[in-house]
Amino acid sequence: MKRIVYMISIIIGFIAISSLIITTSINQMKGNKKVAAVSDVDTKAIIDEQKIKKVDGEIKIRLLRSATNSVEEMNLEDYVLGVVSAEMPAEFPEEAIKAQAVAARTYALAHVEEFGGTSYSKEKNANLIDTVANQVYYSKEQRFAGWPENKQEGYWSKITEAVNATKGEVLTYNDRLVLSPYFFSTSWGKTEDAVSVFNHQEPYLTSVDSPGEEDSPKYTYSTEKSNDEIIAAINANYSNCLNSSESLRSKITILERD
């Protein structure tokens, strides 16, 4: 039986996979604004070769708003700002917020077909949706509603500065945009190979040690599910596979742990 892997879509700044990925820019990079860059590439070639769609000189993102079921078009950097404000606590260090911005920008462009990505919905002509199905996105008004009033402007300014400081920077591998820029909050000391999670391998998503996470509130946790809940979840994907607690205990064996 295939292993069940729980993925958490909340990033912290020190992303374990970043040590395996080249960080560069789709625009001209400014010396000290590289994030963990290990080499430079011909960014103009990337832009020309992948035929990045630009409108009025800005890359546009078409975002499906779940609350209204309508599509909103916005500049890429405005989208990144809304994602970073939603995906990462504003109290985090500036460098962590910058790392989130690079990851969010990469994830966005990986859903633009001109980059070889797959949009969230061709039917609605939307690159992404504003939920955990892709990346959570908040408008400024939505974000302010969830922050203490006396901290709203300071938090927003801090995130805006981090996004602006990384403007145009994305993750690449072998001079190409990373199309699987997955991120998460905590890997419990070691990341997992992509093939174990998604059934396909990516050379930049391989298992590595991830020290320094011991203080994360998600480093250890537990959850409980009843037999009936597990049976329902399995039967939802494999019709009538199990019909009782007895069958659950007799048919399922833990083969390994990781």
Image (cartoon, rainbow, N blue to C red):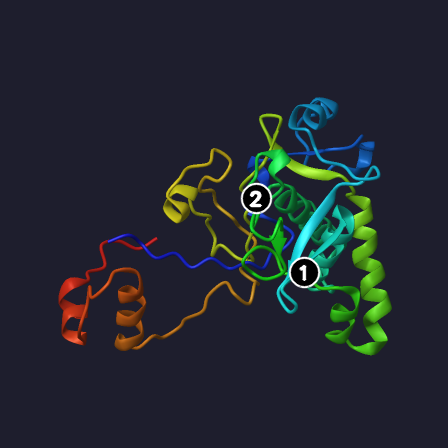
Instruction: Indicate the quadrant where residue 195 lies.
Output: top left
What's the amino acid at mark 1? Answer: Tyr
> Does residue 149 appear left or right of residue 105 in this picture?
right
The number of numbered discs placed on residues in the rendered structure image is 2
Q: Nearer the viewer, residue 72 or 31?
A: 72
In the displayed structure image, the side of residue 164 where residue 257 appears, left or right = left
Q: Secondary structure at mark 2?
A: loop
Q: Of helix, strand and loop, which one carries label 1? A: loop
Residue most extreme to the front: 123
Res. 154 image quadrant: bottom right
Q: Tell me the CA gap for discs 2 and 1.
A: 17 Å
Image position, residue 163 (x, y; %) = 78, 50
Q: Quadrant of residue 200?
A: top left
At a point 32% along the width and 67% down the height, the residue shown is 233
- Judging by the rendered image, the residue that carries numbered circle 1 is 137
**Relative depth, front residue between 217 and 98:** 98
Tag shown at residue 163: none
- Pointer 2 or 1: first along the chain: 1
Question: Disc 2 designates what residue?
Answer: 181
Residues 18 and 60: in front is: 60
Badge 1: residue crowd in 10 Å (few <14, some 14–19, many ≥20)? many
Residue 177: x and y in percent read 61, 34
* Labelled pair 2, 1 in contact (Cβ < 8 Å): no
Which residue shows up at 56% across the image and 47% down it?
122
Nearer the observer: mark 2 or 1; the answer is 1
Mark 2: amino acid: Pro
Callout 2: 10 Å neighbours few (<14), some, many (20+)?
many
Q: Is residue 250 left or right of residue 193?
A: left
